[in-house]
Image: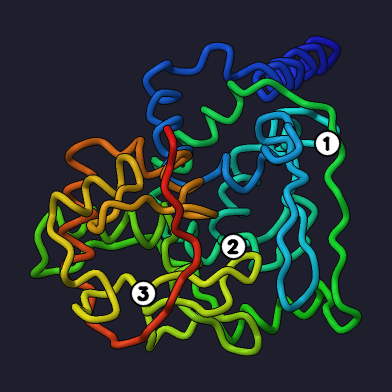
Amino acid sequence: MHITRKLLSLAASSVLLWNTASFAVDDAELRKKGEYIFHLAGCMGCHTDTKNKGALLAGGLSFNTPFGKFYSPNITPDPVHGIGKWTEADFIKALREGVSPQGKQYYPVFPYTAYSQMQLGDIKALWAYLHSISAVAQPSKEHELSWYVFRVSNRGWKMLYFTSKEWENIAGKSAAWNRGAYIANALAHCGECHTPRNMFGALKTSQHYAGNLAGPEGAKVPNITHDVETGIGGWKKDELLAFFSEGATPDGDYTGGLMAEVVDNSLKYLSKEDAEALVSYLAEVPAISNVIKSKEKKRRSD
């Protein structure tokens, strides 16, 4: 009996050591893949308060919405203030179901509605990469929400507007189109900004990518459907690729504001193959006529 207890104790200790230091022996290729997913998923742009010189992924970035002000949390491996004590299963559940390790329902300002479509291999790779980031002992800020917004209401919201399902390729579409669709809808979550929302903050799926008059921080987000007059239907392939890599628009200008950050932190990291796949997908997004006059453009000096 004494030997059995000792063996169980050693086993428990081994599990603890694995949970706290597993990524020291993790596969370098997995972390490399995770870094790529990290960029495409826009993690840096939301979880780093660059305006106030915040540490990488330490959170604190504010998001003004009709429901109040939200702050992004610390997702560094810090065991107290970050995700250092999370398990891989906790991370998967957060992205797939929008639920914290403590069972709290996340507000959909966290785009788990898109991330729930991520392939399991990509989630695991991202998890591995996040544990290579330096831990930052910075507490996450409490949201400043309107009086009528309660976390418990997220359950009802999910019942009405959310279904968790991993992305499945669409039969009859090319491999490039499917890859582009996966990048746009699951990883880069383009629709979260480029699709208008109803009064409850849910996406109006009938106006997929048609632009948003009240996007993040109240900014106008342009129509990126294939409509020639009001969308990007008139853009050529090379023009879209130039936009992804440097934010250049067909009229010789450059995007600015929040979209410039998306280019810098995410789109410019697209591989040539993935950039072309994204072009293939956007070229077939059904055209919707919807005029969105954005004031986000500005010429870059870099």
Mark 1–mark 2 Cα distance, whole angstroms, equals 21 Å
Q: Which residue is drawn at 11% across and 66% down?
A: 173
Tell me what residue is drawn at x 43 percent, y 17 percent. 27
Local crowd size for mark 3, using a 10 Å CA cut-off: few (<14), some (14–19), many (≥20): many
Q: Is residue 203 left or right of residue 209?
A: right
Find residue 76 and report its horizontal and vertical position in percent: 69, 32
* Mark carried by residue 29: none
Which residue is found at the position 50% from the left and 67% from the top? Answer: 295
Q: Is mark 1 on a helix, strand or loop?
A: loop
Q: Distance between the residues labelled 3 and 2?
A: 29 Å
Which amino acid lies under the numbered mark 2 shown in the image of this protein? Answer: Glu
* Residue bearing mark 3: 223
Looking at the rendered structure, the kind of residue marked 3 is Asn
On residue 97, the disc is: 2
Q: Do the residues labelled 1 and 3 touch (CB within 8 Å)?
A: no
Mark 1 or 3: in front is: 3
